[in-house]
């Protein structure tokens, strides 16, 4: 790498001074890496529009011998089921994100107030579950038998709604980025804590709210585990899309493993292209939302680690 | 601070106790039909038309015996959790491979039905007849067998259009494994670029049913030894000569090009449906694979193994009653099962859906409609006994024998019955070694069962490695358990 | 705590309103985290269900205390040894590679001139972070499937024999590291990148006037500036050294039995003990131990962090 003295200002970094060759080399490297990260996505998409015959003959390939939209036609035919799951996932993601942001931000604010009398106790309350839990069986009993969450939408929504980690992250952000003077003067003016929180703290914390909101949204969008545990097979109207995909996968494995169950009913196995089409259906909304949050994310990501 | 912690602890205890109490007893029911909670198995999701069918079924059963059911389909994870966390049910599906019957009965989870079944439901008692042993531990009955096929019978499913129609051969009812060779040869001559015995890496389905698996798939007792002193001797799978002969055949066929070269690695199921010869476990007279619309040609089933019986092949489906159920509910469960056994129309309703919508009767058998295949298709053993449901014909042309179960059960009188008498191996003390042995066996399994490698040479290698890993230690442990078990039974 | 008696009964208004504000979250914690905590007891019991009595009764009155029996079994079980070894080795590997590579990439990225390329690279790098493991397992399958996967198609087309990926334990350490890296390194890179660009430019300017080369600047300016955040993240990861990503080790590997020796981690083992064998005591003991050690490590790490940077630390 050759230094060329202080070059022209480039994107704001006056110290960015690489030779043309080195720059080209690095650029090529990053183009390659970027391609590598999106390649599997593209590949799965191509498989989903390959014809069965092509898959049977050439295997999964970037260049199928024949294209076909059969998988998507099949998807359209089961729109009742798949479409419903899609909407359920969207609803779950929206509700879950809002709920978890409320739970996380209020607690984070409370913990960030050094004058709060129970601050230590409350911090312990939040930190202990990061390490100790009653285990699957106990949670299952409490959720199903005490709260009656089995086969309800709430079973998908509530158990994963809060995260100790994000509370700590947000608390740190509040402490470092909300000027104490603002809060003090507001306090002198007689504003109550909830009002201070709503009027001053939240507007100043958009980046961190946004970042954590995005993370929570994705964890809801990607969740299937609670559905596997809490939603019985009778209630497929409560299957989120990821769980549908998990089931497709399991069905094929089940068929392959239990060919030996005597007289097993021969059902149409979902074709490989179809399964890949469901993958595409799950990924596409992520891609669509991507540009919207990508920018705000730039500022927020540091909040996720500042002095953690 | 301390005070707060104390208060929190106290509150916690209180809520916990509530949780305890809330689950202790169900409220007594008022008059009207008894509603039973019935757990049954399904791998992914229940059929679309379930609610509709159940509503109809409940109306009938309420009128006839004063019982309705709340049928809850569960996956394997939910079965484990719900059972162990003491969730309430009245009756539950139980079998050899899910919600393990012997274990749960031994733990005392199931209601002892021995007296009740005789006094409350004599017709049910008679219907199960000589098969109560399946649901018993010792001389106590803990579960009602939902009778279906009980012995393992393995068939070649052969393209009869081609072999009988075009080639004028005659397909017998049963044959020896090696007798398949001439057919493969003819087919290969006509279709030099195709493979008559196309298979996936799991090999020919059901081929292992010539022995009873005791530990994993590598320690077995061959059915051919039943009735001899060796009938209770656990041996490594390669000492089962019948099995080895089949593997040798497969290897020869592989070399001759009858088996697809990539068999050991492929997982492609759909294509293998179309091959002229395929293998599977079923029972004599089964028509479930015979619809020419699914496979493109008419088929015939030719048996090459079985029927062989052991406790695991018999325990394909049972219904057990919760040990915590009240006697009233236990009686209701039995009445319901009696109805399943004795009322054919009712049984068909649960098994196949609504007549005229999901299926039609034809010549005493059931033919599914398209809507039935879409909205109410599931294995019929999860909703009751297969023997009391009408049999399924593939179409009006491909009729099943409406009386097939009588014949199947007649043949069971000649079936080879394992001498292990319901023994099941408890592997908890050998977990680690077994995991290592399974992994070893898995390494070679695909090549062996697809004929890709010479079994005699490969077995030498496997045997060496498995013995070094502790095969004999596991075998001795299993043999000791089996001997103890048999001694206790006497 | 001194002088606490004086205003013991009087909560300040601000305390009261803060209590109110935190109430929903506190309730959530009590309901979903603390209420089920009684489950820890299972680790010291041989759990047995008493029909009709419910879980709590079965646990407290129906099951025998076995003391540390479950823990003893844990240590006696050779399978567990493999799981612990795998967990530690993979985490160590992820930790080393997951720090060095992203840091290197982040610094390199900051040197690229094209603003657009920098932005596109970051966008691409973040994407895998947001995909679930189920999706990733499908991606992996489309490459690794024995009969149809892209890798085997390529291998056969150049005349090599296909590899049975899901049966061959020797390839999985590499595969898991690659897949983990594909999903996670981009995120770390973007994270470190945001620190790299936040470094005060005047530091570089004065160095440039002194005639420092790019390499020297990285060594003497960039890396020291990043040291804080790197240390914190590394120490934090140490706290999770015994935990593993269930999705990666269970779903991406398709729970294939033949490759368990290379892929089984503590979490997978515990899950299977629970689901396949209903061994509640055993799995509770394993996770208690796992979490206990993780907790100690994190506390230690936290203390170390504070020593390095008095303002840092998580807790």
Image (cartoon, rainbow, N blue to C red):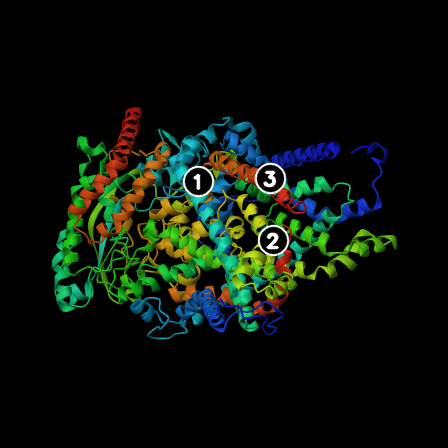
The residue lying toward the viewer, choosing from A167 and A180, is A180
In this rendering, do the residues under marks 1 and 3 share a single chain? yes
**Image coordinates for residue C125, horizontal then vertical, percent:** 51, 63
Earlier along the polypeptide chain: callout 1 or callout 3?
1
Q: What residue is at 61 percent from the left and 52 percent from the top?
A: A154
Q: Which residue is mark 3?
A: C299
State whether residue B240 is above or below residue C179. above
Given the image, what chain letter belongs to the residue carrying mark 1?
Answer: C
User: Based on the displayed image, in which of its 4 quarters is residue B211 positioned?
Assistant: top left
Q: Which residue is mark 1?
A: C84
In 3D space, how far apart are the residues under numbered discs 3 and 2 (Cα atoms)? Answer: 31 Å
**Image coordinates for residue A115, horizontal then vertical, percent:** 79, 44
Under circle 2, the secondary element is helix
- Quadrant placement of the C terminus of chain B: top left
Given the image, what chain letter belongs to the residue carrying mark 3?
Answer: C
**Image coordinates for residue A207, horizontal then vertical, percent:** 67, 61
Q: Which residue is mark 2?
A: A157
User: Based on the displayed image, in which of its 4 quarters is residue C151 positioned?
Assistant: bottom left
- Look at the image and tell me whether residue A254 can be seen: yes
How crowded pointer 3 is (Cα within 10 Å; few <14, some 14-19, many 20+) is rated as some
Given the image, what chain letter belongs to the residue carrying mark 2?
Answer: A
Q: Is residue B308 left or right of residue C219?
A: left
């Amino acid at each position: 790498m050759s230094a060329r003295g202080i070059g022209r200002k480039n994107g704001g970094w006056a110290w960015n001074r690489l030779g043309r060759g080195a720059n080209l080399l690095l650029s090529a490297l990053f183009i390659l890496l970027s391609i590598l990260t999106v390649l599997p996505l593209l590949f799965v998409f191509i498989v989903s529009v390959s014809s069965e015959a092509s898959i049977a003959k050439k295997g999964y390939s970037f260049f199928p011998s024949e294209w076909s939209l059969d998988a998507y036609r099949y998807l359209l035919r089961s729109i009742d089921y798949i479409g419903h799951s899609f909407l359920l996932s969207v609803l779950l993601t929206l509700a879950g994100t809002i709920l978890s942001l409320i739970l996380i931000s209020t607690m984070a604010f409370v913990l960030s107030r050094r004058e709060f009398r129970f601050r230590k106790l409350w911090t312990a309350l939040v930190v202990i579950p990061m390490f100790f839990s009653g285990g699957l069986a106990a949670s299952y009993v409490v959720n199903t038998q005490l709260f009656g969450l089995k086969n309800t939408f709430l079973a998908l929504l509530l158990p994963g709604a809060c995260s100790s980690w994000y509370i700590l992250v947000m608390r740190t952000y509040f402490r470092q980025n909300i000027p104490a003077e603002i809060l003090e003067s507001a306090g002198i003016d007689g504003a109550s804590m909830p009002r201070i929180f709503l009027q001053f703290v939240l507007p100043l914390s958009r980046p961190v709210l946004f970042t954590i909101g995005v993370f929570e949204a994705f964890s809801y969008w990607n969740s299937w585990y609670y559905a596997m545990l809490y939603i019985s097979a009778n209630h497929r109207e409560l299957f989120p899309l990821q769980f549908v995909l998990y089931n497709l996968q399991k069905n094929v494995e089940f068929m392959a493993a239990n060919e030996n169950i005597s007289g097993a009913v021969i059902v149409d196995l979902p074709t490989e292209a179809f399964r890949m089409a469901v993958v595409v259906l799950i990924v596409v909304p992520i891609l669509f939302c991507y540009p919207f949050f990508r920018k705000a994310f730039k500022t927020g990501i540091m909040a996720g680690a500042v002095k953690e | 601070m301390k005070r707060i912690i104390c208060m929190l602890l106290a509150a916690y205890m209180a809520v916990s106790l509530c949780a305890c109490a809330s689950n202790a007893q169900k409220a007594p029911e008022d008059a009207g039909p008894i509603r039973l909670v019935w757990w049954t198995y399904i791998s992914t999701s229940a059929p679309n038309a379930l609610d509709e069918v159940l509503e109809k079924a409940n109306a009938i059963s309420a009128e006839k015996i004063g019982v309705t059911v709340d049928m809850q389909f569960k996956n394997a994870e939910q079965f484990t959790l719900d059972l162990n966390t003491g969730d309430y049910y009245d009756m539950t599906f139980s079998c050899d491979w899910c919600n393990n019957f012997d274990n749960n009965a031994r733990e005392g989870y199931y209601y002892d039905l021995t007296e009740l079944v005789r006094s409350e439901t004599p017709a049910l008692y008679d219907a199960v007849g000589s098969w109560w042993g399946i649901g018993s531990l010792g001389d106590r009955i803990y579960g009602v067998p939902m009778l279906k096929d009980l012995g393992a019978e393995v068939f070649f499913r052969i393209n009869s259009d081609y072999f009988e129609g075009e080639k004028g051969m005659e397909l017998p009812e049963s044959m020896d494994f090696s007798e398949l060779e001439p057919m493969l040869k003819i087919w290969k001559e006509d279709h030099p670029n195709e493979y008559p015995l196309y298979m996936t890496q799991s090999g020919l389905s059901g081929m292992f049913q010539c022995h009873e698996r005791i530990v994993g798939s590598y320690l077995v007792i061959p059915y051919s030894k039943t009735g001899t002193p060796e009938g209770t001797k656990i041996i490594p799978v390669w000492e089962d000569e019948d099995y080895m002969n089949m593997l040798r055949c497969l290897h020869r066929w592989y070399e001759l090009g009858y088996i697809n070269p990539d068999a050991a690695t492929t997982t492609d199921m759909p294509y293998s449906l179309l091959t002229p010869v395929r293998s599977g476990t079923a029972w004599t007279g089964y028509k479930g694979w015979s619809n020419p619309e699914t496979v493109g040609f008419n088929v015939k089933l030719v048996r090459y193994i079985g029927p062989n019986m052991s406790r695991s092949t018999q325990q394909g489906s049972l219904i057990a009653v919760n040990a915590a159920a009240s006697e009233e509910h236990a009686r209701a469960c039995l009445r319901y099962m009696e109805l399943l056994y004795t009322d054919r129309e009712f049984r068909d309703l649960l098994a196949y859906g609504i007549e005229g919508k999901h299926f039609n009767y034809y010549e005493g058998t059931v033919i599914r409609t398209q809507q039935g295949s879409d909205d109410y298709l599931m294995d019929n053993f999860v909703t009751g006994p297969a023997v009391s449901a009408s049999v399924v014909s593939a179409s009006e042309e491909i009729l099943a024998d409406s009386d097939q179960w009588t014949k199947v059960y007649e043949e069971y009188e000649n079936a080879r019955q394992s001498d292990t008498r319901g023994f099941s191996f408890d592997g908890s003390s050998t977990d680690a070694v077994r995991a290592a042995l399974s992994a070893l066996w898995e390494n070679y399994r695909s090549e062996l069962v697809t004929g890709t490698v010479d079994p005699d040479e490969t077995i030498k290698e496997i045997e060496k490695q498995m013995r070094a890993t502790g095969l004999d230690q596991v075998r001795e442990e299993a043999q000791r358990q089996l001997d103890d078990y048999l001694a206790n039974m006497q | 705590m001194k002088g606490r008696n004086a205003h013991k009964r009087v909560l300040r208004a601000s305390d009261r309103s803060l209590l109110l504000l935190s109430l929903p979250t506190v309730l959530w914690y009590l309901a979903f985290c603390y209420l089920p905590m009684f489950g820890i007891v299972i680790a010291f019991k041989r759990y047995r269900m008493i029909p009709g009595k419910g879980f709590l009764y079965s646990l407290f009155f129906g099951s025998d205390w076995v003391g540390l029996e479950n823990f003893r079994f844990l240590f006696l079980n050779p399978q567990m040894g493999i799981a612990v070894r795998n967990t530690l080795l993979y985490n160590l590997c992820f930790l080393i590679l997951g720090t060095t590579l992203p840091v290197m990439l982040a610094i390199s990225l900051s040197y690229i001139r094209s603003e657009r390329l920098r932005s596109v690279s970051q966008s691409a790098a973040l994407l895998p972070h947001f995909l679930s493991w189920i999706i990733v397992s499908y991606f992996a399958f489309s490459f690794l499937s024995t009969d149809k996967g892209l890798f085997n198609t390529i291998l056969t087309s150049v005349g090599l024999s296909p590899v049975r990926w899901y049966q061959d334990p020797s390839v999985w350490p590499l595969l898991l590291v690659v897949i983990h890296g594909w999903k996670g390194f981009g995120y770390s890179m973007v994270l470190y990148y945001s620190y790299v660009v936040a470094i005060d430019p005047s530091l570089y300017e004065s160095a440039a006037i002194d005639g420092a080369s790019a390499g020297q600047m990285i060594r003497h300016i960039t890396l020291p500036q990043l040291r804080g955040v790197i240390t914190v993240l590394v120490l934090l990861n140490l706290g999770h050294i015994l935990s593993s990503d269930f999705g990666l080790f269970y779903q991406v590997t398709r729970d294939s039995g033949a490759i368990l020796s290379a892929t089984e981690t503590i979490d997978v083992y515990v899950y299977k003990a629970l689901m396949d064998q209903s061994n509640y005591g055993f799995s509770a003991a394993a996770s208690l131990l796992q979490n206990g050690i993780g907790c100690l490590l994190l506390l230690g790490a936290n203390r170390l962090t504070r020593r390095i940077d008095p303002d840092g630390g998580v807790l």
